[in-house]
Amino acid sequence: VMCLALKILNLNMLTLFFRFVLCVTLLDSTFSLIKYNRNCRNSFNHLISSKRNNYGISTSIDVAKETKKSNGFLGGFLSIFKRKSDSKSAENLIPVEVPERISAEVVIVGAGMAGLACAKELVAAGVQNVLLVESSPKAGGRVGTDVVDGYQLDKGFQVFIDSYPESKKLLDFDRLKLKPFLPGALVRYQKEFYLVSDPIRRPGDLIPTLISPIGSLLDKIKVGVLSIAIRFTALSDLLNIPETNTAEYLSNTLGLSDSIVDRFFTPFYQGIFLSPLSEQSSRMLGFLFKMFTDGAATLPAEGMQAIPDQLAADLPVGVSLFNTRVEALTVNNDGTVSIRATKHAPFSPSAINTTTTTAERKTLFLDCKNVVIATCPPTAQRLLDSLQINGSNPSPRDVKISIPTARSSVCLYFALKGLPPVTDPILVLNGENKLSSVGDGSTVINNICFPSQVSSLYAPDGMSLASVTIIGNEKLMAKESRDGKDVYVLSDDELELSVRSQLAEWWSKEVTDSWTLLRVYRIPYAQPAQTPLPYRAISAMTSEDLQSEDVIPVQLANNIYCCGDHRNTATLNGAIRSGVQVGRAIIKERQLELKK
């Protein structure tokens, strides 16, 4: 019938066919743009579905899939003629444009470990419309990994202790593919390396440990007895022992000699808490000692970034809003909180089938019932300083937080060909680095690690990765203005030169000269200090009574909460627990409101 009609009309069949395809293409493009724009609006103004996103925010992939589904017959017909790259362009779309105002039940500022833990606790309890706002492009805060030339560089030397109680509850260790360090350490003392290990877990290390000059035989017997006793001691009992500083506890309470305190415990615990033993709580010594006794120091196979990535992946799609800096908070007359934020991100252009982007800066307004400040202490105080209640500045005592002294660190990463000088997956300590004696401004190496010997994924095939840690100090973090730019007083080149001279003494110049510097990390606020003692944060580790005077309060003002390792202990475990506690406090408050 078609052929007969064409013959009657005396039209060219090919010409008519192309006209038909052109019309269908125009109709398809029109409907696609209408559907796409509607999806962009609805993704932020409505709850899409419980399976995709209960929190009112959609991702680019969601919108792209929705658009594909909505094309119907026309989309199916035209898919015959579309290039393969068209499907990829939809998947690679930049996230849909964020509206100027977003409403949420709870807004969490900061996607570090505390913020992620809080979000997961709230979502698990069924709290609807949770929004996690983060200024950087990815989750993790101070826990993260950068990939440079195929090397995985953690943001400063970090380890994951697999016996942390809060981590066990929240994380799937199998997915992290944890790779353990050997227990103990290799200690460099008087130009030689000596093994200090745990003979209970590695009986073969008994003789080398006993004959090493890192402590006397009596010291090692005392530490061995402590190791056995602590295995059978409840964590709550350890955290309730009379508190003193770690230096006094090791020397006076345990009766250990200077040879083992200075050569092993000092560099080991300095590397963990980034401060002299005299400024560390003895209770934290007991806590960490038990954690290392019950478990192991590990690294996720794909870097420390795998830890926050797992928590973020477990949240519903669209909960997280990245590249967004919170500027100011206001508590309204009805008790709700308004947040002004700035989003720094590329937004999608008008064309749906292109990956071209335009960078924009956009002001957002977030309205919520509760806000959780899960940032580092300086940022938290900046936000609290901006806080207004009912249009006026609040009383400072109501919303001020105590900012613990910053503990800083410096980490240099080197790439080297072949195997490193230490092939075992073990930490190497400088047994002659005592912070109280080296002086301020020191660039003395505290510890070295070869992460690629723990997980081979940390370095490309045939290469190795070295991590060199220096305990931070004011001079290492000091900056000055040069040519209109703030630069470090001690440049990275000068720092590298100092470190290389030490590495040449540790091994040899021939070995270390071929090492290539990959990156220098200077972390001004690596963790909060434990001083002054008593270390009040420890109470929050075991107490469930968040109203207790011994516990740092989680609620700062009307509907404003705060969490982080500065509200609990200066550990990853403390950050997670703090986030969980704030989540539970909000849930409890909601339950009380429902009863009323």
Image (cartoon, helix red, strand yellow):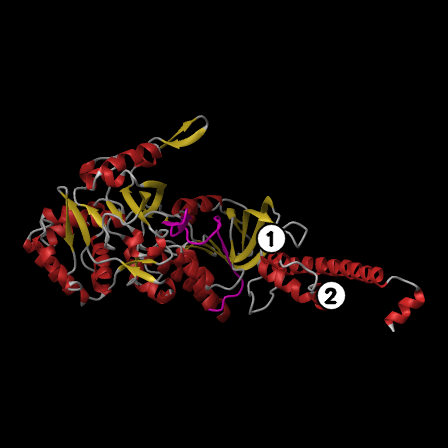
**Residue 449 sits inside the magenta stretch:** no
Which residue is painted at 68% across and 52% down in the image? 351
Describe the element under mark 1 as helix, strand or loop: loop
Q: Nearer the viewer, mark 2 or mark 1?
A: 2
For image coordinates 64% across by 64% down, the residue present is: 66
Give the side of residue 178 with respect to residue 85, left or right.
left
Seen as rendered, the residue at the extreme top is 483
Where does the image place residue 201, in percent across and percent down from the top left?
18, 64
Question: What amino acid type is highlighted by mark number 1?
Answer: Val
Residue visible at 34% across and 40% down in the picture: 517
Left or right: residue 115 versus residue 15 is: left
- Amino acid on which disc 2 is placed: Leu
Outermost residue, bottom side: 1
Point out the tag, 2 or 1, that comes first from the N-terminus: 2
Residue 219 in the image, given as x and y percentages of width and height: 8, 54
Q: Foreground: 421 or 477?
A: 421
Magenta span of residues: 125-153
The residue that label 2 is drawn on is 74
The crowding category of the residue bearing disc 2, from other C-alpha atoms within 10 Å (few below 14, some 14 to 19, many at least 20), is some
Q: Nearer the viewer, residue 463 or 68?
A: 463
CA–CA distance in space, label 2 to label 1: 29 Å
Would you say residue 144 sits in the magenta stretch? yes
Secondary structure beneath disc 2?
helix
Instruction: Where is residue 374? Give x, y as percent.
Output: 42, 53
Q: Which mark is residue 98?
A: 1
**Residue 445 versus residue 487 in the image, above or below:** below
